[in-house]
Amino acid sequence: MKTPNMFDTEVQFEGITLNVDPINRSRTDQDDNVMAIFWEEQPFMWHFSKGYIDHALKKSSGEVEFLDVGTGSGIWSILVKKHLTPKSVIALDINKRAISQAKKNAIRNKVSFDVRNEYYGMHSVAYRSAKVIGIYPPYHIYPAEVENKIPLHARGGIDGQQLFKEQLTTANYHLAEEGVIVFNMMCLGRNGKPEFARYIPRIVEQSSLKYTNIFPPTRTREFLLAVYGEEFSQFQKGLSKSFPELYFCDGVITRDGKGKIEEIPHKIPLYGRRWKDRIQLHKEVAKHGKDGK
């Protein structure tokens, strides 16, 4: 099977066809890149989460059936509309190029949904109105001095976790009873757990968390050294000391009032994808941090 490549401009998956940007496209904040597709990200997450999404669409109550936060190419809204046929889908993105691309991809795949160029905030939808919320936040790990040069789809803030925490806080306001938040996250960790397993229960009220390790955890120091070499050495050492482990996960947060946290295995094929592929991706992102393009 041919899996998506970070330099592709067109991707086919699960009966849909998408136009996307290659990871190395020159960009500015005014003309930023649309997130590329990687097998271990969007396609893998679809296989992992579609059953949970379908269950929540049937069991939860709320006028917004799927809220797509950071839609990018529109892949998630298109997949959900094609295969699970919800009536109300809202896709948000702050990147104007992504909004344009998502609209074109929707037309190409003969589906329609509400696409909005806006920052995800409390105003986006009504209180506890969303059955399913998709969150795929940027998580590239970088020192503060290069933040404004990093593409928006990779610019996640402090330790690659800041924007995720902000989006979870907002999603907590929007998530309906028995609704789910599905997410993808590369996350720093320690003592055998990703950090999100500690902060999600504090942020999303009356919820349970299930997550899977897409790849086995790796060492933070080894990953950062492979991405940056000896550059930003103090940043690398300090972060690696505080959080020696690095995780790459998909997760499902359910508003069920049970407060359970569970790591579950998966049997989804990876087609040879592994940490070395993630390193190559983040090296390409880091190049933007050097030249700002």
Image (cartoon, rainbow, N blue to C red):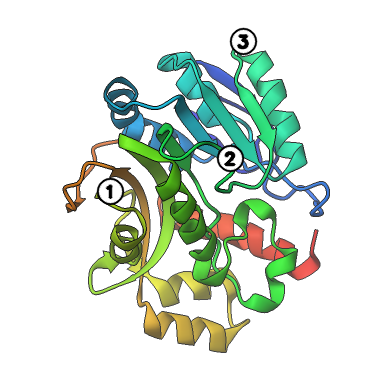
Residue 212's label in the rendered image is: 1
Count neighbours of disc 2 (C-alpha within 10 A) and say few if under 14, some if 14 to 19, many if 20 or more. some
Amino acid on which disc 2 is placed: Ser
- The image shows residue 73, relative to residue 153, as above or below, that is above
Tell me whether the residue at label 1 lies in contact with that at label 2, contact meaning CB atoms closer than 8 angstroms. Answer: no
- Left or right: 74, with 62 as reference point: right
Count neighbours of disc 1 (C-alpha within 10 A) and say few if under 14, some if 14 to 19, many if 20 or more. some
Residue depicted at 29% across the width and 66% down the height:
198
Quadrant position of the N terminus in the picture = top left
Residue 110's label in the rendered image is: 3
Q: Is residue 119 visible?
A: yes
Amino acid on which disc 1 is placed: Thr
Q: Which of disc 2 and disc 1 is earlier in sequence?
A: 2
**Residue 197 percent across, percent down from the top left:** 29, 61
Residue depicted at 58% across the width and 48% down the height:
121
Residue 124's label in the rendered image is: 2
